[in-house]
């Protein structure tokens, strides 16, 4: 994993074999990111994608292995319980160029992954909401 900060942006490269969510959390901690957005693309061969069931208020996650393009990954960085909190969604494309996606739990880079984190000077936290069962933005 390599990073370079330019102005209010962090340029990110995550390398083969590294896990994307964990790497992004480490970058947020290293740069003390409290609020921002992220957009990325690359390739994965092991990805776990979730779907939130609004009736049961539970995530159903599925693991996929194979060659996939990440096209794209996007998300928000906020804070919860004094820790950076990532809310990431991903779309992946298979060998037939069909895409599917959802809430990103985990993805291992198969070739490379690159992203730009857009930093916002400020802080937004999250609070658990009983009605939806989700950690909502506290704004
Ligand atoms: Fe989500």
Image: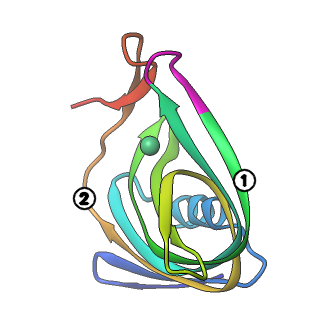
Where the N terminus falls, by quadrant? bottom right
Q: Quadrant of ligand 1?
A: top left
| Secondary structure type for disc 2 | loop
Q: Quadrant of residue 107?
A: bottom right
Give 108 or 1, whichever is nearer the viewer.
108
Q: According to the image, label 2 marks what residue?
A: 121
The front one of 71 and 105 is 71
| Quadrant in which the C terminus appears | top left
Q: Residues within 10 Å of mark 1 (few under 14, many from 20)?
A: few
**Is there any visible trace of residue 91 in the rendered image?**
no
Magenta includes 57? yes
Mark 1 Cβ inside 8 Å of ligand 1? no
Residue on which disc 1 sits: 63
Whole-Å distance between the Cαs marked 1 and 2? 35 Å
In the rendered image, residue 80, in percent from the top left (x then y), is placed at 47, 35
Q: Secondary structure at mark 1?
A: strand
Q: Is residue 1 above or below residue 121?
A: below
**Is 17 rendered above or below residue 91?**
below
């Amino acid at each position: 994993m390599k990073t370079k900060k330019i102005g209010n942006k962090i340029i990110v490269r995550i390398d083969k074999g590294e896990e994307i969510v964990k790497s992004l959390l480490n970058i947020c901690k290293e740069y003390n990111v409290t609020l921002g957005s992220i957009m990325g693309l690359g390739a994965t061969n092991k990805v776990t994608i979730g779907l939130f069931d609004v009736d049961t208020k539970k995530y159903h996650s599925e693991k996929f292995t194979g060659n996939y393009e990440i096209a794209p990954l996007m998300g928000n960085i906020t804070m919860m319980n004094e820790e950076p909190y990532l809310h990431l969604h991903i779309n992946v494309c298979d060998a037939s160029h069909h895409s599917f996606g959802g809430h990103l739990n985990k993805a291992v880079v198969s070739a490379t992954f690159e992203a730009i984190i857009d930093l916002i000077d400020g802080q937004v936290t999250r609070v658990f909401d009983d009605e939806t069962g989700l950690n909502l933005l506290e704004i």
